[in-house]
Image: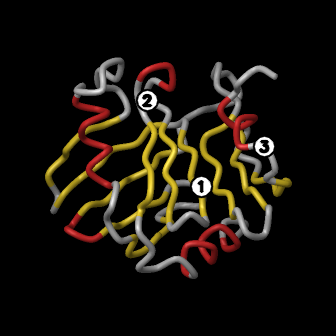
Amino acid sequence: MATFKVESLFDNRKSEITEEVIAGGSNGAIIVINIGGKIDVFISCAWRLFRNDTQITGWHEESVEKTSPLVSGIKKLEGLKFVSCSFHSEFDFDLCFEGGFTLSVFADNTAKSRIDENWAVCDISSNKCYTLSNEYALSEDVYDDPQQLLGDPK
């Protein structure tokens, strides 16, 4: 399975603290999660956040204001320990955090989508980034410019 490399990156980060979560504003529903200062996770496809099987927020909620349900909900992950990652299909996965929080990610962007990627998992220390395209191709690239993944102009 092509996602084995991605899953193994998470295995090495268990008990790391979620240092930062970026969401809302100009990012909209795209979220960026930094785990332990060592992994950046970019999610531009559908996602939902649960706590003990109760939905907290999801990708389709209001995200402009910092107090919006999407932003305030996903920010609950900041400061929590990362527990595990499990792929439940080749491209969909759950990230689990302490306190019963689970972020479920669903790769729903297709070749006809206006968004080129579904998600990316980047290992800062090895300078590698694994990206799932909207054509469901997993690529391995150099991770030397995080702003490229956010689509920021140069």
Q: Name the residue under label 2.
A: 29
Image location of residue 69, percent across then percent down: 22, 30
Given the current orientation, which residue lies at the most extreme right position? 142
Name the residue type under label 3.
Answer: Asp
The residue nearer to you, when weighing 104 against 70, is 70
Secondary structure type for disc 2: loop
Q: In which quarter of the image is residue 9?
A: bottom right
Which quadrant is the C terminus positioned in?
top right
Cα distance, mark 2 to mark 1? 16 Å
What's the residue at 45%, 74% (across, down)?
A: 16
Cα distance, mark 2 to mark 3? 21 Å
Q: Name the residue under label 1.
A: 40
**Camera-nearest label, 2 or 3:** 3
Name the residue type under label 2.
Answer: Ala
Position of residue 132 in the picture relative to residue 143 (left or right): left
What's the residue at 52%, 61% (across, down)?
A: 89
Q: Quadrant of residue 5?
A: bottom right
Image location of residue 45, percent across then percent down: 52, 37
Of the image marks 2 and 1, the number of the one nearer the N terminus: 2
Image location of residue 143, percent across then percent down: 79, 53
